[in-house]
Image: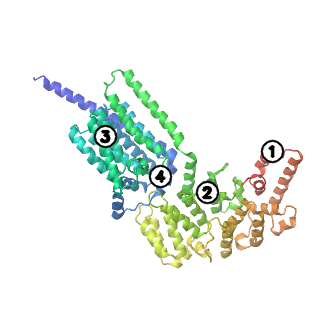
Amino acid sequence: MAAKGPIADKKKTYICAMKAKVAYQSTLFYTILFAGLFAYLQAACKWHFYFIEQNQVFQNTAAYVLESIMKFGGLADTIFGFFLQTYTIIYIGAAVTAALLTAAGALMGATLGRVLVRCVATELLAVIPIVALLLIHFDFNYLYSGTVAIILTLAATTLTFSVKNPTIRNCIHPAVMLLLAFIAGPAFALYGAMAVVFEGLAKKNLRAALVQLGITIGLGMGIIALNISPEIRFTFLPDFYYHDSLRPKSVIYFSWIAIVLVLILACFFAKRARPKSRLRRWTEFVALAAILALMFFYGTSKYRNSRAEKIKELDYYCRTQQWTKILEQSKGPLSNYLLLNYANLALANTGQLGDKMFAYRQHGPFGLISEWDKTAPVSVLHSDIFYALNLTAAAQEKAFEAYISAISGGNPRMLQRLVDTNLIYGAYPVASKYLDILENTMMYKGWAKDRRKFINNDDAVEADSQLGPRRRALPKTADLGFMKAFDAELVSLAESNPEDSVSITYAGLWNLLCKDVGSFKRLIESHAGTAGLRRLPVSFEEAIILIAENDPDYWQRFNISDRTIARFMEFKKQVVAANRSNSAYSLPQQLQTMFGDTYWYYFKFSKI
């Protein structure tokens, strides 16, 4: 009997050592996972994080937080909303997202540890759902509260699956589901599915599994009956964590499916003894690593939209007024209207639009301002363009549309725009109301407090370098409306504010991009030499020569530069030579290098 003491102590020491070893390996594994995710997300998605920060206006007040928490799934939304407001800070977006994904992986591994012996292969198995979860994060319509909900669910399974008494455990499941429904929304259904698998396969209690299935369905139907959630897909599925006006892509379901399937696999592997062969253990490790690598590289190439990432990058530069950065990123062919909008807006804000616009491959008038597709990102861009043109009413309208259509309740930059446009109009009570909201935020309260000085202070508004000129440019009549008579709107604005060169330049370029040389001719004859058009931009000079190709006296009326005339003569010479040599079919390619940046090239070869 005495011999059992040392043996028991040795066994206890061995178990403690093994637990410490597993804990060390697990910590090291998830530290490496976090570092890898952070490096990848920062390199591939840093603009995405700045972009989605604009999806909400989170107010740091007790009343706002309480109201947010009390909604269906409100705690998950509130938790992430708190972190989302910090995404304006460099590295924070990648760090928080990597931390959330790593936490989900660690909790998945802990849940699987209730079924399997913890080892590196177990941790790799746990990462499969995390790779699937990563893919939906590339979609800016996805609400990261869905990731927080998964973490809360896996934290619950980690705890409840460790309860050994089956009666107590099966009594806990319904209580946990009810709690998850309140704090995390439809994630209770994910928990219910995992409880069914755990009880039915891991614990081989089919009756308990069926009971948990019935409770899950009953709870969901009760939520719908009480009008807490509007329909089945927002009650049982992760559709709840997506823009409520859109149907999510199938990728949103991958992580939920993977979590359940991995748990089923764990139950299957638990039925057999842990392989003693080192070769067999390495085979399992390599196979799981290969599956993860395949999922990652195939998934990221398929679901990460690099073109959308470019739009997000330009949106950030536009928001921070880094116009030269936009121009640097706009080199080469630009076939997308939104990319052209950003490039042309940057040219306008640097005073180069009339001279250099055709250096960027234009594709009709929508390169100046694209058609509105009723989405928040395009509304934001349109508001920026209208604001640059001093079309204050249109800028305010698009800002309001972008604000109310934001996924999670508001767009802070557009709220700033609403403040400024109302200050321009002298609508101080409305501007003050919006400032009240911004003063409750973490990242915009300083800006809001500074803007307070303009409330009920006409002199301060008129003296401000941004607000003053726009107030003086307000038209005497109401705006004509977007796309009804865009060039006429700009001409009217220029007439009410003769110093405004941007609006008259935009109006002329709109005519040129439409190849409406008649309207351009009337415009230039009316406004050349006025305060807003003392110097003709290069593109205007080129168009004047095109209008009156055989009338040099008409050119002299507008003092066309010798350089522009010389370039036209060379352009005409090459066109005539190509026609004589029957090589007109290759003329665009021949002229591209020397004249691709001219209006003549655009007029002759571009299709609109």
Residue identifier under label 3: 195
On screen, residue 171 versus residue 314, left or right, reads left
Q: Residue at x 37, y 43 (%)?
A: 104
Residue 498 is marked as: none
**Looking at the image, is mark 2 or mark 3 earlier in the sequence?**
3
The residue carrying pointer 2 sits among few (fewer than 14), some (14 to 19) or many (20 or more) residues within 10 Å by Cα, namely many
User: Marks 4 and 3, how far apart in space?
Assistant: 40 Å
User: Marks 4 and 2, how far apart in space?
Assistant: 23 Å
On screen, residue 322 versus residue 155, left or right, reads right
Residue identifier under label 2: 342
- Per the image, label 1 sits on a secondary structure element best described as helix
The residue carrying pointer 3 sits among few (fewer than 14), some (14 to 19) or many (20 or more) residues within 10 Å by Cα, namely many
User: Marks 2 and 3, how far apart in space?
Assistant: 51 Å
Which callout, 1 or 2, points to the residue nearer the camera? 1
Measured as percent of width and height from the top left, residue 342 is found at 61, 57
**Badge 4 amino acid:** Ile
Residue identifier under label 1: 586
Residue 90 is marked as: 4
**Looking at the image, is mark 4 or mark 3 earlier in the sequence?**
4
